[in-house]
Image (cartoon, rainbow, N blue to C red):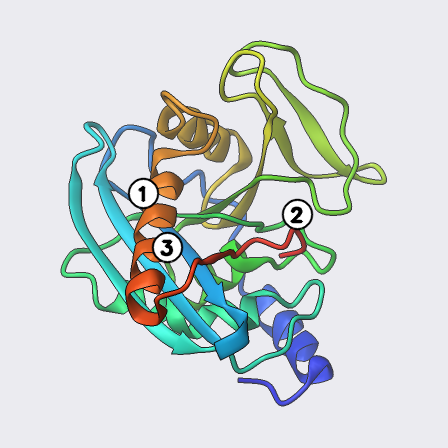
Amino acid sequence: MPADEAGARAIQETLRARMVLDEPGPPPGTGRVTGVDVAYDDERDVVVAAAVVLDGATFEVLAETTAVGRVTFPYVPGLLAFREIPTVLAALESLPVDPGLVVCDGYGLAHPRRFGLASHLGVLTGLPAIGVAKNPFTFSYEQPGPHRGDWSPLLDGEEEVGRALRTQDGVKPVFVSVGHRVGLDNACAHTLRLARDFRQPETTRRADALCRKALREATGRVPVPAEYGDG
């Protein structure tokens, strides 16, 4: 764990060089997909991570696990991963099956230094990973069309860092970016398949519910949403 912000940024720069962005990734509807999410009790510096493995074709839950840790890094915009990574890794490592594709409630390439949680986690584990966020961070986009599957580029200037993707007719889009070993077209296809009935992917919904339940059991307090909107 880095000692300060400068150390964290240096780690991001080093690890970013190991990102693989030229692999398409596993086809949607095949293999396993794993949702990861975290919840905090900031007053007690407690973070709980959950990992839920689904069958990519049927959405059957194949395995799930949680891990409880301490928050050891301050909240700094753009460095959120350093608050979460140790506990998320602990949850993933305790799974009894291979996670397959990892879906993060956050960002990958759509990050000021192009290295959000999905990229960080993917590089450290070697697993294919994507980020599906609830908001666009600091980037700009045009509203996609009103129908499920419509999308528009998420832009930093003229650079496409992800996509605003409509997962249900008439609902707000989610913001998809690649993390590691997955292409953007495929990341969006996975997101659409996983968001079959709701705005958020089923992986995220299951992991969110599990980590909130685990935090209540660990602390007796109502969880705080983990995603601050700045990866």
Res. 17 visible in picture: no
Q: Quadrant of residue 73?
A: bottom right
| Residue 24 visible in the current orientation | yes
Which residue does the image show at 62% across and 10% down from the upper left?
146
Q: Identify the secondary structure beneath mark 2.
A: loop
Say what amino acid the circle numbered 3 marks: Arg
Crowd band around label 3 with a 10 angstrom C-alpha radius: few (<14), some (14–19), many (20+): many
Q: Of helix, strand and loop, which one carries label 1?
A: helix
Image coordinates for residue 213, horizontal then vertical, percent: 31, 55
> Type of residue at label 1?
Arg
Classify residue 172 as left or right of residue 44. Answer: right
Provide residue 59's location: percent of width, then percent of height. Answer: 22, 32
Which label belongs to residue 110? 2
C-beta proximity under 8 Å, tags 3 and 2: no
Residue name at image x 19 percent, y 28 percent: 58
Viewer-proximal residue, 208 or 147? 208
Residue 5 lies left or right of residue 187; in this view the side is right
* Residue 160 as seen in the image, left or right of residue 210: right
Observer-side mark, 3 or 2, equals 3
Q: Which residue is mark 1?
A: 206
Q: Residue furthest right?
A: 157
Callout 2: 10 Å neighbours few (<14), some, many (20+)?
A: many
**Residue 109, x across and y down, in percent:** 62, 50
Residue 152 higher or lower than 44, as above or below: above
Marking on residue 184: none
Q: Nearer the viewer, residue 82 or 160?
A: 82
Which residue is tagged 3?
Answer: 212
